[in-house]
Image: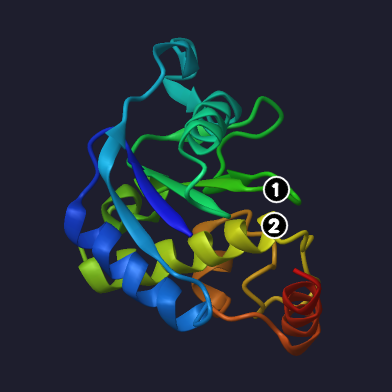
Amino acid sequence: MGILRVGEVNSEVVERIEENLRIVFPKAKCTLISETLSVPSEAYDKVREQHRSDIILRRIRAYAEKEKAFDRLLGIIELDIFVPELNFVFGEAECPGKVALISLFRLKPGFYGKKPNMEILVERATKEAVHELGHTFGLTHCSNPFCVMYFSNSIFETDRKQSLFCNKCQTKINALAMRG
């Protein structure tokens, strides 16, 4: 599993996410890619002042196809991202597939008028990374509000859920791992 920065991203946060992903996915080899992917200019929506996650995800997919070194590739960006039918997203992924993307923009306590807090940011980012990577394994949203696969419509829902899969989702992940 590769982790790829998209644009300027805080290295300490990325390294901490990588450490946490090694715990959640102990059988996966996690590699922080030294290269940084540029943010595609065509992803920026001037009216919304946000970036389209699907366009960025396609760029990550192209990188993955070119490199062929990773079974999964997680992109991390610090810009605000969205899909056309929603106001914003914390992330997006192929389901199932190889690539995922998370944004740190709305995971930062400062976005909500709070003091910067590295621990809260890393915890939130880890949850979103695990969630989006879960989609790449074919997992859909879970109805358990404490499962990492629960759909977060707000930061409060992200804060409530855990960074781990519930038993039902873990069983699905295990079954997929046995097949793969």
Asked if the residue under mark 2 is in contact with the one under mark 1, i.e. CB atoms within 8 Å, the reply is yes
Q: What residue type is labelled 1?
A: Gly
Assign the C terminus to one quadrant of the image.
bottom right
At x 60%, y 56%, the residue is 132
Question: Residue 22 appears at what percent x and percent y?
Answer: 42, 77
At x 50%, y 68%, the residue is 127
At x 75%, y 49%, the residue is 95
Residue 97, numbered circle: 1
Element class at badge 2: helix
Q: How far apart are marks 1 and 2 (CA)?
A: 8 Å
Q: Is residue 52 left or right of residue 50?
A: right
Q: Spot the residue most to the bottom.
A: 167
Q: In the rendered structure, which disc, 1 or 2, sits on the residue that comes first in sequence?
A: 1
Would residue 150 be visible to someone looking at this image?
yes
Closest to the observer, 70 or 76 = 70
Would residue 114 be visible to someone looking at this image?
no
Closest to the observer, 156 or 63 = 63
- How packed is label 1: few (under 14 Cα within 10 Å), some, or many (20 or more)? some
Above/below status of 176 relative to 62: below
Q: Which amino acid does label 2 sit on?
A: His
Question: Residue 18 appears at what percent x and percent y?
Answer: 35, 67
Question: Residue 80 appears at what percent x and percent y?
Answer: 42, 35
Residue 86, numbered circle: none
Look at mark 2 in the image and give the residue it sits on: 135
Residue 109, quarter of the rendered image: bottom left
Element class at badge 1: loop
Question: Residue 85 appears at what percent x and percent y?
Answer: 71, 29
